[in-house]
Image (cartoon, rainbow, N blue to C red):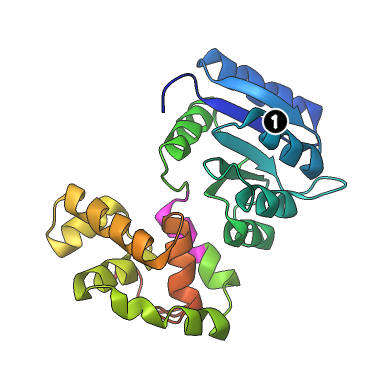
Amino acid sequence: MSGPLRVVIADDQTLVRTGFRMILAADGIKVTAEAADGAEAVAAVRSTRPDVVLMDIRMPRMDGIEATRQIMRGEVNETRVVILTTYDLDHYVYAALTAGASGFLLKDVSPEHLVAAVRLVRTGDALLAPTITRRLIERFAPRDEVKADLHRDLSELTPRELEVLRLLATGLSNAELADRLTLSAATVKTHIARILSKLGLRDRVQAVVLAYETGLISPGGPSAAG
């Protein structure tokens, strides 16, 4: 992960792209390309191979959801997509997460949070506050019988890993997981890495979505505080 962090900004508003470019550049982050629609975003990713894409959802010609889907199934599979949205509970955001996005940011994000978020996603972490993850998925996640059947191999997980996944899906952060299970933060990270590997998942966002879609945890079930 050497060299400057490389970002593509995809948004149909020139002022948004310009503002984000200035913020990122001031922190030494290289914007390799800008895109005004999803098709341009996909082309930019293929040609510049960025670490992160800041992706608006509502764009002409091709929206951010389809662009995310194409990027995630392309050869440039190390690229992470962060969705830009005006609303913190938008059903389009859920669709983008299931398409492979690693999280989302509100467009009125502070410059400091924007920079921190881009750097966090580059490391492979998912960018979703645990409480927002739970609210978003509870509101929009369907019970998917097909995916449930495909992932009956949850039995591959050890009892501890299954417990970690279940608590992860309730919205607990790594620190809260460590506290709840009386484990070190490093051990929690190891458990999560093994869960993702065994289930063939990209990041913890996909793990949380899967937990709901397979019925491991149900919307309206026990909360993080419970």
Give the main secondary structure of the magenta stretch: helix
Question: Which amino acid, by three-letter code, is at mark 1?
Answer: Ser
Q: Is residue 69 visible?
A: yes
- The verdict on residue 134 being magenta is yes
Dot 1 crowding, Cα within 10 Å, few <14, some 14–19, many 20+: few
Answer with left or right where residue 186 lies relative to residue 138: left
Q: In the displayed structure, does residue 183 sit left or right of residue 205?
A: left
Number of on-image labels: 1
Which residue sits at x=32%, y=68%?
Answer: 165
Residue at 60% in and 70% down: 140
Which residue was labeled with disc 1? Answer: 47
Magenta segment range?
A: 128-135
Image location (x, y in percent) of residue 107: 64, 38
* Residue positioned 58% across, 19% down in the render: 30
**Location of residue 110 in the rendering, given as x and y in whole percent from the top left corner:** 54, 30
Camera-side residue of 38 and 183? 38
Q: Which quadrant of the figure has residue 94? A: bottom right
Look at the picture and state if 190 lies above or below 150. above
Along the line of sight, the residue nearer the viewer: 104 or 68: 68
Q: Where is residue 129 in the image (x, y as percent from the top left)?
A: 44, 51
Task: Indicate the position of residue 180 as horizontal and vertical percent values.
Answer: 19, 63
SS state under label 1: helix
Is residue 143 visible in the rendered image? The answer is: no
Residue beneath the point at 50% across and 16% down: 27
Instruction: Please identify the quadrant where the C terminus is shown.
Output: bottom left
* Magenta-colored stretch includes residue 68: no
Picture quarter containing residue 33? top right
Question: Outermost residue toward the left?
Answer: 182
Q: In which quarter of the image is the N terminus?
A: top left
Residue in the foreground of this view, choosing between 72 and 26: 72
